[in-house]
Structures are given as C-alpha cells and as structure tokens.
Image (cartoon, rainbow, N blue to C red):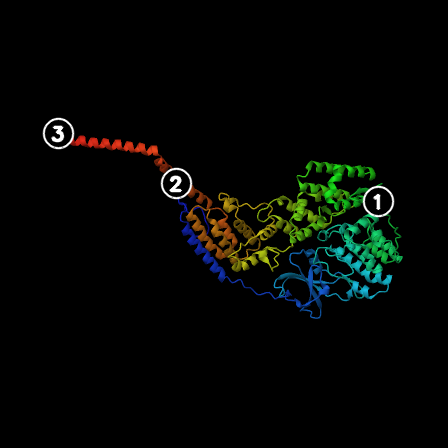
Amino acid sequence: MARSGVPAVIESKPEMDINSSADSVRDTEYTTRLFEQLRRYDVSADAPIRDSLLDRYRIDTNAPLAELDTQSAKAFAASDSMDPERKLYALICQVGKPLRYGAINKLKTASAPHMVQLVAAGVVTLSIPDEERFVVFFDRPTGIRLSDFLAKNQTAISTEFICERIIAPIAATIQYLASIEVPHGCININNIYMQQFATLGPCVTEPCGYSQPFYYEPLERLQSLPAGKGTKDIGQDYYALAVTVLYIIFGPTHFAAFSSQNALAKSILREGTYNALTQMKNMPEIFYDFFRGMFSHNPEDRWEYPYVRNWLDGKRFHALTPAPPAEASRPFEFMGNEAHTRSELAHMLAQNWDNITEILHNGKLSQWVAASMRNKELADSITRIARTIGDLGTKNEAQLNDQLMRLLMILEPSAPFHIKNLAFHVDGQETLFAELYANKTNQELQLISHFIEFSAVNDWIEIQRKKPNYTMPACVNNSVIKHDKIRPYIRVNGLGFGLERILYDLNPDMPCLSPLFQRMHVVTLADVLKKLDALAPTLAKNQDPIDAHIAAFIASKLSINKEISLRELKPIPSLASHRIMIALYLFALAQNRTDSLRLPGLTHWLALRIIPILEPIQSRSIRHEIKAQLMDKVQTGYIQNLAQLVISGSYIASNNSGFKQAWNTYHQNEQKINNYRLSGTVEQQRIQFGHSLAKIFAYFVMIISLMLVLQGG
C-alpha cells in the first residue's frame, strides 16, 4: 500500500486490540529509531559572531560604563567597525521587560537635534552572559550630566544661559520628537548632558516615564504606577523641562519638601500646580510667565512649543498667579481628609478604596455633590452607581470593582483608571500588564483582565469626546483595538489562551517567554519554529515541544480568537482535546505561515509525542498503519504532512466501522454464551436431549427386534 495518506481504503478488520505487548514492542522500535535519527540530526549553523550586531557594531563586555546605565539596561563601551573613530555605547536590555520598540524603530531613522543619536538596535548573542539579548547602540554623549554641572557651578547660573543653552535646545528637541510621535518621558537633570548646549539622553529601554522621578511628572501621570503611565501626551516633556529649570534655579533643597508621590499629588490638588511646585518663592522676573504657562493646572492650557518659542523670543504674556482650585461651597470630609474639588475627591477616594462603599450606601457623597457642588447630573450618576453596588452586595467582587472604578472615572476623567491598588492610563495598561506578569502578581493581572472584559474604556472615551476639539490619540486608539480583539476570548482558558495570550496580544513585540527559550530572544513565528527544531535533539526525550507561552505566542501571531477545536477527531474525544494534537495543529499553521521552513527536528519531536497517544484508535491495523506512515512523513520535515495524517480524521470512519462490526459480533457471541449459561435453559436442553436420546434408543431396539422376528418367521 502506498503510504501517502490514510484514506478510507484502509481495510477495517473486526478485531479487538488484545495484543498490547506487541504494540509496545513496535512502539519501542519506532521511538528508538526516532531518537537515533535525532541524535544524528545536525542542526549546526554558522555560529553568530558574539557581541556583535550586523557584524558591524561590537560590544566590549569587559568595559562596562556604569555611569550610563539606565534602570532597565546595563551600558558597555561599543564600536563601529566601519567608523572606528566613532565612540558608541550599548545598552543591554533586561529579559522580559517591555521596551519601546515603536520609538526605537522611529529613532533609528531620525536625527533629533540635541539628543544622543540612536545608531542601531537588534538581537545580539552575548558572550557574557551567554545568551541572546536585545541591545540598543547610541553615540556616546559628550559633556557631563547636568546634575554634575550644577554641582560644579555653585554660583547662580545666568538666565541667558538657562534660556539659550538649556530651554531652547531641549524645547526644539521635544518639538521634533512630537513631530514623529515619540514622547521622551525621561527629561531630568540626570539625563541631560551639558557641553555647549544641553543634550537629552536616551529614553527607549523602558516604558515611557518608568524611572522618571515623580516630581517631574504632571499630576495625571504622577497618580499612575510607573509602568502604567502610557505615552499619549507630549505635554509631559514640556512639564518636565519646566521642573528641570525650577531645579536649576532653586537647587535640590527645593524638592526635599516633596516627601512622597502622594503628598505632592495632594498638594497640587489643594493648591494648584504652579503654587505647589514653585512654593511661591521669588525668582527672576522673566520666569514668572514661563512657570505660570508651563504649570497651568488645566493640562489643555499648558504651554507647548509655540508659546515657549515666543517667550524665548521676548514676548511676555503677563499671566496672573492662579488661585487655588475650588469647586464646592464646603469641603467633603472622609477618613480624616477634606476635598474641595472633584479631582481632589477622586484622589482621596482612590487612596481609601476599601471604604468607598460606606459613603455610597449612606448617600452622603451624592448629597454633597448636589448641595455643595450644585451638580445634579453628577449626583444622579453617583446615586445610580450606589444603587447598582447595593444590588450587587458582596457576591461579585469583579463587578463591584468595576463600579467603583467608574465612580472615580466620572469624578475625574483626566486621572488614571484606579482599580484597588492599580492606577494606569488606557495606553499604559500594556506595559503594566507585562510588569505584573513578570512579577507573577496574578490577582492584579485578573483586575486588568476584568477591566478589558467590562469595556470601561468605551465609556471613558465617550466622556473624553465631550471635551471641545477632542481627538483620540493614536496610542489610545491602538489600545481600544486590542481590547476589542481580546474581549471575545478573555474567559477562554484552553491551550493558546489565558493570561499568556493577553500578555502577547497587549504587547505584540514582546519576545516569547517560554522556559524552553531561556537565553534566547524569540520574536517571530519563524524564530519559534527554528529554535524548537534546534532544541529537539536535546529536549525531545523529556519535554513536550509546547507550553502555555509557546501556544499563546503562536495563537497571538495567527490571530486565533476561538478555543481550538479539532472537529474531525471529535469521535475520539481523548485525541481531540490532547495538548499534543493541538500543538500539532498550531505548529502546522505556523509553518504554513512562514514559507514552510523544513523542520526535521521538530517533526521527529512531535512524532515521539504522538505515537504513545494513538491507543484510543481501536483498530490495531489502522493504528499500525498510521504509525508506519508517521515514520515516513517525519523525514520530510513538514509538520503539515503529520497534521494531515493524524488530525484530518480520514481514518475515523474506517476505525469506527471496523470497531462497530467487531463490537456487534462480540455482543452476538456474548449473548449466545449468556443464553447457554442460564441454568434453566441448560437443564431444559439436557432433559430434552435425554428424551430425544431415549426415543432414538427405543426406536433402534424396536427396529432390531422387528428384524429378528421377521428373520425367525
């Protein structure tokens, strides 16, 4: 028989598989052959040049540059073989930490003025440690850090120097970054280098603003967790520039008063941004306009480049000192604190999450909003939320958290989303989810999953659209699209889904974090298949070629949005739901998507896992035929061939027909045996047989007697 498939012409024999020992011997022969072929499988390729990218940019791992380290990357001296005089340095990024891949791709082809140049980036095989890492190469900054420059220049720096050498070049750089939609997010005295003019340091090896000192962040980002700040607002960089100037004028002691992130947030909410940050100190006359514009309490009114440029050119706006914000005729008291505005109230409630339901149940909050703020619409919204929470009781914590989050959202739509101890912006949830996953904080991951499931972001967008001239930033729109993609399967827990799937759909540039890929940086379907093929000789004996990460990574790249169901195998449920069968299906799709790379190592690995699980096929002849064909098809290196053989289910009809025939024959024979075993029937048949035998004997005697009589006569 030709072994090109398993068509229905395979004869189905009415047999039961009673010779398991013979099967075991044959399976042992098959697996021995597969292991021997894997042992001889040569996966060696041209060894990558270690510590080198594109065989051009080289890292000197013996020359660390600790002064250029970032919180998420270690710095080393580097060089360019095509330009030996050019001084570079490399930032070696941490494993599993989210990077700003989009910003990296844009900055590789850009030339931002007064910012260290990003020269190249990619995966490098390192010698120390012996693994693959993502590495970003930069021109080495000249000059010294602004913090060191200020320490060396104890005398007051002139206003002309601040305006011409620091504000002007950095503002121009921020404006350029805005034009390519790359907020910097890390403008501070330790990431600015001074030579003739100020130069900004790098910003791409961690989420936007991740390690930014809290007092450089505007209120709406100050209230967020570091990994959840997002990137949507370029205004954060102008704000950070203004704080930098404040630092230059007043020195480090000025910021000692900001004892904590929460204390500064409360101060800004109570006094206003300008008053809280300047502490109403005297300063050179020229900067009053600058700080009042840059520290406007309303984010939409803060200065950006056109205002800064006009101010540098000598225009004076004569802005008045803003009064402290106030909306209510009397404060709302809660947990020993007072709130005078919606924003202050939202922040106060977020800091006391577990006690919010108390003031909702007693109606004090809605009463205060209606009476002291004279906002009946808002009071009615709060009453509706209180009623919903009352109906929920304590039975559904996820829905309770959702309602409390919506309460804070309608009080202050510009603040980050608050869910228990989490605080994040729409476009910051991706990187926050990645950090929470890396820290294995499952409870918090579930909170973000419920946030996506309950579609709160859609209501938030409707609130934003009520603002004049609101335009949804591209990064927010991308986050909404991801939500819509994830929501249909968020409760699916089969292979290819779960928290791992959410991780890769939220962070499509995230490398696969499977334990099988330790020391590897795997970012494409082709990478997954080639790495597994190379690992087969060493791992096939003791490990499966799939786990939750590999399955989720592949399913994400293939945009599979329903639980995988092998319908052709449903007549044999144990095969239809087996993880190896699902792995075979996923790998076949992935190989088909990647120009059908030839993968003999992976096909042998899969065959080793498939052979032992075929026992539910009742027909021994069909089972043996499938295994024999499997041994032929692994040699091709094409997983699709294995999938067509095992998953197509073409043998199911033959197997079922033969099994049904054998089953019927067995039952017929069993019925006959049971009938004979019935004691009454056996006794009756014995008596009938005795009577029959006696009759025969009597007739025989009578005939002989008659013959003797006739002869005697």
Q: Quadrant of residue 365?
A: top right
Q: Mark 1 belongs to which amino acid?
A: Ala
Callout 2: SS? helix
Labels 1 and 2 touching (C-beta < 8 A): no
Which circle's residue, 3 or 1, is located before the other in the chain?
Answer: 1
- Where residue 394 appears, as percent x and y from the top left, is 68, 39
- Where residue 439 appears, as percent x and y from the top left, is 66, 53
Q: Is residue 602 left or right of residue 154?
A: left
Q: Mark 2 belongs to which amino acid?
A: Tyr
Q: In the image as oriented, which residue stretches furthest toward the bottom? A: 85
The quadrant of the rendering that contains the C terminus is top left
Callout 1: SS? loop
Q: Mark 3 belongs to which amino acid?
A: Val
Q: Is residue 230 left or right of residue 43?
A: right
- Where residue 620 appears, as percent x and y from the top left, is 42, 48
Q: Is residue 605 left or right of residue 557?
A: left
Which circle's residue, 1 or 2, is located before the other in the chain?
Answer: 1
Q: Nearer the viewer, residue 652 or 393?
A: 393
Q: Nearer the viewer, residue 387 or 597?
A: 387
From the image, tell me which residue sits under label 1.
326
User: Can residue 449 be seen in the rendering of this structure?
Assistant: yes
From the image, tell me which residue sits under label 2.
666
- Determine the CA span between mark 1 and mark 2: 88 Å
Callout 3: SS? helix
From the image, tell me which residue sits under label 3.
709
Q: Quadrant of residue 67?
A: bottom right
Is residue 614 shown above or below 254? Answer: above
- Determine the CA span between mark 3 and mark 2: 56 Å
Q: Nearer the viewer, mark 3 or mark 2?
A: 3
